[in-house]
Amino acid sequence: MTRFSAYFDESTGNDSPILVVAGFLSTDAQWSLFIREWKEVLAGFAISAFHMREFAHRTGEFRGMEERARQQLMGRLLGIITRRAKLGFAAAVHIKEFEAVFTGSDRTEIGSPYKLGCTANWLEIGERAQKHYQVEPIDFFFDAGHSNKGEVQQSFRESKQNPEFVQYRLGTIHFADDKMHAPLQAADMAAYGFWRWLDAHFAVKTRHGRYPFQEIVKIPWTIREFDRSSFEEMQVQRKGGRVDKKIVHRVISALRPGQTDAPHYSN
C-alpha cells in the first residue's frame, strides 16, 4: 500500500494582516528521494539547512553568497520540490478579522489562527483521502518551534476521534526540527512565498507572484482563505445555524493540474 506524509510550516510578520500555514503532500517513497536530493544540493553549497527568511534577507548561512550562487541554489531546490511533491495545500487566515469575530469564550474554544490554519489543511487532505479511497493513514509533520503546538496536537486528536472523519485516514502528528527534516524546509519556502504574496496584495490579489513563488505553484494547490465572512459562518455553524454554502465556497480556491499561474481567490 502507498503511504503518504504531509509537511507544513507557518509564516507571518509583525503587524501583518495574514498568517499562512502551507506545505506539501507526497508519498513516503518520493519523500525519501526528496530528502536525499535536497541534502546533496545543500551540501554542494556548504549549507546545513535552508531557511527562506534567512535566504531572502541574506542573513545566517546566506550572508555574502554571490547572486549567481543564490540563483543556482534556489533553482535546484525548486526543481526537487516540483519533481517530488505531489500536491500543495495552504490556509491563509486574516488575523485581525479573526480577532474581531472571535472574542472571549469563543476565542478560547476556537483557539489561535495557527491552529485554524493547521486544522484546515489536514481536514482538506483528509477529505481528498476519502474521495480517493485512501487506505493507509496519512502522517503529518509541523515545525517544532511553534508556541501553539499543544493546541494543534489536541485539535488533531479531536479530529481523529470525530466519527465524521473516520474515512479521512488521519494517521499521526509530529512536531519536528526543520534543521533535521528537509521537507519542512520546503514547507517553509512555500509558506513564506504565499505569505509574502498575500501580505503585499492584501487589498487586491494579483494573479502574478514573483519567482520563486511562480515555480512553487506549478504543482496543483488547494488553498483556503479564511476572511470575515467565513469566520461569521463558522459562528453560525457553531451555534447550530445553517451554513450558507455559497459563502463558504467563495473563500475556497484550488489550482488545477497544469495551471502555472499564481493562485486566484474569488470574493
Image (cartoon, rainbow, N blue to C red):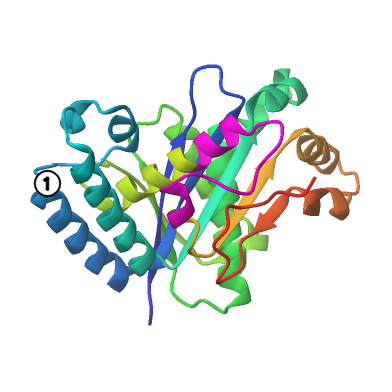
Segment tinted magenta in the rendering? 194-215
Instruction: Pick the residue in front: 179 or 119.
Output: 179
Q: Is residue 96 magenta?
A: no
Callout 1: 10 Å neighbours few (<14), some, many (20+)? some
Question: Residue 72 location, x and y as percent?
Answer: 23, 51
Residue for point 61% across, 52% down: 263
Instruction: Pick the residue in front: 118 or 188.
Output: 188
Which element carries disc 1, helix, strand or loop?
loop
Above or below: residue 147 compared with residue 171 = above
Query: In the rendered image, which quarter contains the N terminus?
Result: bottom left
Above or below: residue 112 compared with residue 166 = above
Q: Disc count in the image?
A: 1
Question: Residue 15 location, x and y as percent?
Answer: 56, 17
Q: Is residue 14 visible?
A: yes
Residue 163, quarter of the rendered image: bottom right
Query: In the rendered image, which quarter contains the C terminus?
Result: top right
In this rendering, position of residue 231 left or right of residue 225: right
Q: Is residue 154 visible?
A: no
Q: Is residue 201 magenta?
A: yes
Residue for point 38% across, 78% down: 2
Residue for point 67% across, 61% down: 164
Question: Residue 193 location, x and y as percent?
Answer: 46, 42
Residue for point 73% across, 20% down: 103
| Residue bearing mark 1 | 45
Above or below: residue 201 compared with residue 129 = above
Question: Residue 29 location, x and y as percent?
Answer: 29, 73
In this rendering, position of residue 62 left or right of residue 77: left
Above or below: residue 14 compared with residue 27 = above
Residue 149, quarter of the rendered image: top left
| Residue type, numbered disc 1 | Phe
In this rendering, position of residue 7 left or right of residue 114: left
Give the residue furthest to the bottom.
Answer: 1
